Amino acid sequence: MKALVILGSPRVNMNTDTLLNKVIKGLQSQNVEVEKIILSRLKFEPCIACDVCAETGHCYKQDDLTSIYDKFNNSDIIVVGSPMYFNSVTAITKAMVDRCQSFWSSKYKLNQSSIDRNRKRKGMFVGVGGAKYTNLEKGFIGATVVMELFFRATNTEYMYNMLVDNTDEIFVGDREEILKEAYEMGVKLAKN
């Protein structure tokens, strides 16, 4: 099995990245081959709604995101991690999601999917919020709605969320129960 893990935080080795690394260790414990992509290190432009993909099934832009399209297609597992910025995913994560419009267009406008619709993919979102939420699910709704559409566009079954709040007060690296849960989520994702 192959997993694509995407860090949508501009900060490496902080809360989101720490959790993703534990998920990766859980996946690897089940012999899953993992590739991690740090979006902040890529140079790519946002979708400009030019509609070229509605005619061709592919984005015309050639940049660092271009190579990720094949990685989505060839993955059995996709994990995306993002901190909450104004109650949703980061701008770089959303820009990546928007550029997946080409998958949607190829499937629903052209009926010639540019991503393998027969390949079964499993998806997980790791969301991190600095605030302490009284209702965890509601606090992350802006991000999970975006991720639901992303996973649908990439023909991925959205299986799990790992939502962690209160990181302004307590770094996830100091929360053993959360780190253990992240590892176990990676194992579970590989097995199910």
Image (cartoon, helix red, strand yellow):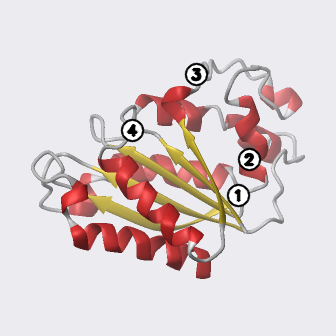
Give the answer, above or below, for where 5 lies relative to 182: above
Nearer-N-terminus badge (3/2): 3
Q: CA distance from mark 4 to mark 2?
A: 21 Å
Q: CA distance from mark 1 to mark 2?
A: 13 Å
Answer left or right for 40 relative to 73: left
Residue carrying label 3: 46
Give the answer, above or below, for where 174 lies relative to 66: below
Q: Is residue 109 visible?
A: yes
Q: Which mark is residue 128?
A: none
Q: CA distance from mark 3 to mark 1?
A: 21 Å
Work out which residue is located at the far bottom of the displayed protein and give it: 191
Residue carrying label 2: 71
Can you tell which of label 1 and label 4 is closer to the viewer?
4
Q: Secondary structure at mark 2?
A: helix
Nearer-N-terminus badge (1/4): 4
Q: Do tag 3 and tag 4 residues touch (Cβ < 8 Å)? A: no
Answer left or right for 65 relative to 62: left
Can you tell which of label 3 and label 2 is closer to the viewer?
2
Q: CA distance from mark 3 to mark 2?
A: 19 Å
Give whichever of 13, 104 is nearer the camera. 13
Residue carrying label 4: 12
Q: Secondary structure at mark 1?
A: loop
Q: CA distance from mark 1 to mark 4?
A: 28 Å
